[in-house]
């Protein structure tokens, strides 16, 4: 295969796209040692970096689309290479050239839907608040305690609508004065940005920011760690700062303040999976565990790979939209790890993790052995 352009030129393009940290790499290979891909197939981020450093990147190469941006290798890299940003910069170049391997084509469909409908799921914009139809949820107005932003998957996906409903039950029980923006909210843009579509990310971000400002939003409650990451760490690039709270943090806070009291006995053996964008990317490890520990009778057993060492579900970096062969699904590995510690319930707090684990539960034929729950579903059932 040919490189896209002579070496000097591609190095400049990479730098323009935010990947200049490539030059720091001294090829030690630590990134490959910890990368979850090497548990299911071979993959070398080190090699991609080497090729890019010498301007030998092949933009039709499927490998540049593998990284789930899980955050494991940057925390190990002795040279402080911004590995995720480097990988995304290669995807930006491929996106500019419009070169997408077959397994990546669904990303373009997601992008088209984001432009047309404000969500990646090809669902109608006007139906974004339908999940709340029977739940008497108010529309957000200025002066309310908090805006609840469920995000795309909780708004449309039948499995994940149950998480939105559990969240509403919790907020009502704790007498939180909250509202939603329904059809006025659009995708946060986190995942499409990681696929290299910077223009679309900016368009979505500006749309949400304008809506938040027009409605006097100060504090935003999110269910997805991907929305959390974007609102908290990426929207400030647009010179705005909203207070952003993930539901797992809010649960712990409501319980601490005595506004919420889980008192129904559980008797379940559970394990908790740290989503990459809640844990490694944002350091939120204790709050979901703190909330779970308050449920009477619940037994929490940790998996060996937990907290900063958590094993990725495979859904980040836009991979949630891409094809992954069955033998290469990280979520299968993780589900087996959960069952190995005797868990009857795998609890997590991210819509991508839940989608991937539910799919693995089916394909591994273990529907009777283990349940998948969001932390809100477990708490809601204990109230
Ligand atoms: S760990 Fe860092 S220095 Fe080592 S090969 Fe990977 S990117 Fe390069
Ligand atoms: S961020 Fe995660 S998936 Fe991506 S190369 Fe590093 S370890 Fe692998």
Image (tube, helix red, strand yellow):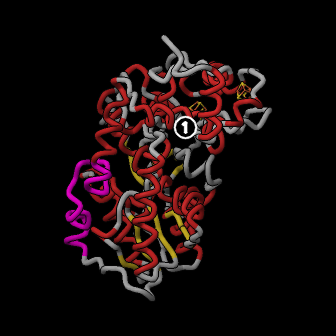
Q: Quadrant of residue 356?
A: top left
Task: Place residue 82 in its image quadrant.
Answer: top right
* Quadrant in which the C terminus appears: bottom left
Percent position (x, y) of residue 370? Answer: 38, 39
Q: Residue at x 48, y 48 (%)?
A: 198
In the rendered structure, the answer to whether residue 46 lies left or right of residue 368 reads right
- Residue 42 position (above or below residue 151): above
Give the residue drawn at x 57%, y 58%. 234
The answer to whether residue 307 is above or below residue 325 is below
* 251 inside magenta stretch: no
The residue wearing badge 1 is: 88
Depth check, front residue: 93 or 378: 93
Q: Residue furthest top?
A: 1
Dot 1 alpha-carbon crowd within 10 angstroms: few under 14, some 14 to 19, many 20 or more: many
Task: Give how far across and how far down residue 362 sits, in percent.
Answer: 29, 32
Residue 109 sits above or below residue 171 on the image: above
- In this picture, which residue range is highlighted in magenta? 113-135
Q: Residue at x 48, y 73 (%)?
A: 261
Mark 1 C-beta to ligand 2 under 8 Å: no
Q: Image quadrant of ligand 1?
A: top right
**Camera-side residue of 85 and 336:** 85
Q: Is residue 131 magenta?
A: yes
Q: Is residue 144 left or right of residue 15?
A: left
Residue 340 in view in this figure: no
Question: Residue 135, percent across and down?
Answer: 25, 73
Depth order, front residue of 77/377: 77
Q: Decide which of 8, 159 is in the foreground and name it.
A: 8
Query: Which residue is at a point 60% across and 18% down the rendered structure image?
Result: 56
Where disc 1 sits, the SS reads helix
Task: Tell me if residue 363 can be seen.
Answer: yes
**Residue 318 percent location from the top left of the image:** 43, 40
């Amino acid at each position: 295969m040919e490189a896209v352009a002579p070496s000097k030129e591609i190095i400049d393009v990479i730098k323009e796209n935010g990947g200049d940290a490539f030059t720091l790499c001294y090829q030690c290979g630590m990134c490959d040692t910890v990368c979850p891909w090497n548990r299911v197939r071979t993959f070398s981020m080190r090699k991609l970096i080497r090729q890019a450093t010498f301007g030998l990147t092949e933009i039709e190469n499927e490998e540049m689309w593998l990284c789930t941006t899980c955050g494991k290798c940057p925390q190990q890299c002795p040279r402080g290479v911004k590995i995720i940003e480097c990988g995304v910069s290669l995807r930006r170049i491929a996106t500019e050239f419009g070169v997408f391997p077959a397994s990546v084509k669904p990303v373009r469909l997601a992008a088209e839907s984001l432009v047309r409908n404000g969500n990646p799921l090809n669902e109608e914009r006007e139906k974004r608040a339908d999940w709340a139809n029977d739940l008497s949820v108010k529309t957000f107005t200025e002066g309310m305690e908090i805006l609840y932003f469920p995000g795309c998957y909780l708004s449309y996906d039948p499995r994940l609508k149950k998480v939105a409903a559990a969240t509403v039950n919790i907020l009502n029980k704790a007498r939180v004065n909250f509202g939603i923006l329904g059809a006025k909210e659009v995708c946060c843009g986190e995942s499409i940005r990681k696929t290299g579509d910077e223009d679309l990310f900016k368009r979505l971000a500006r749309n949400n920011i304008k809506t938040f400002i027009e409605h006097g939003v100060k504090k935003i409650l999110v269910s997805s760690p991907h929305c959390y990451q974007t609102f908290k760490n990426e929207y400030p690039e647009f010179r705005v700062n909203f207070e952003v709270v993930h539901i797992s943090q809010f649960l712990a806070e409501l319980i601490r303040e005595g506004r919420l009291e889980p008192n129904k006995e559980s008797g379940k053996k559970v394990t908790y999976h740290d989503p990459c964008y809640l844990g490694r990317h944002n350091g939120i490890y204790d709050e979901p565990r703190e909330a779970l520990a308050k449920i009477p009778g619940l037994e929490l057993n940790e998996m060996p790979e937990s907290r900063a060492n958590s094993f990725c579900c495979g859904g980040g970096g836009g991979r949630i939209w891409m094809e992954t062969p069955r033998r290469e699904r990280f979520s299968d590995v993780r589900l087996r790890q959960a069952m190995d510690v005797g868990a009857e319930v795998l609890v997590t707090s991210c819509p991508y993790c839940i989608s991937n684990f539910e799919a693995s539960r089916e394909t591994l034929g273990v529907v009777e052995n283990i349940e998948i729950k969001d932390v809100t579903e477990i708490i809601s059932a204990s109230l």
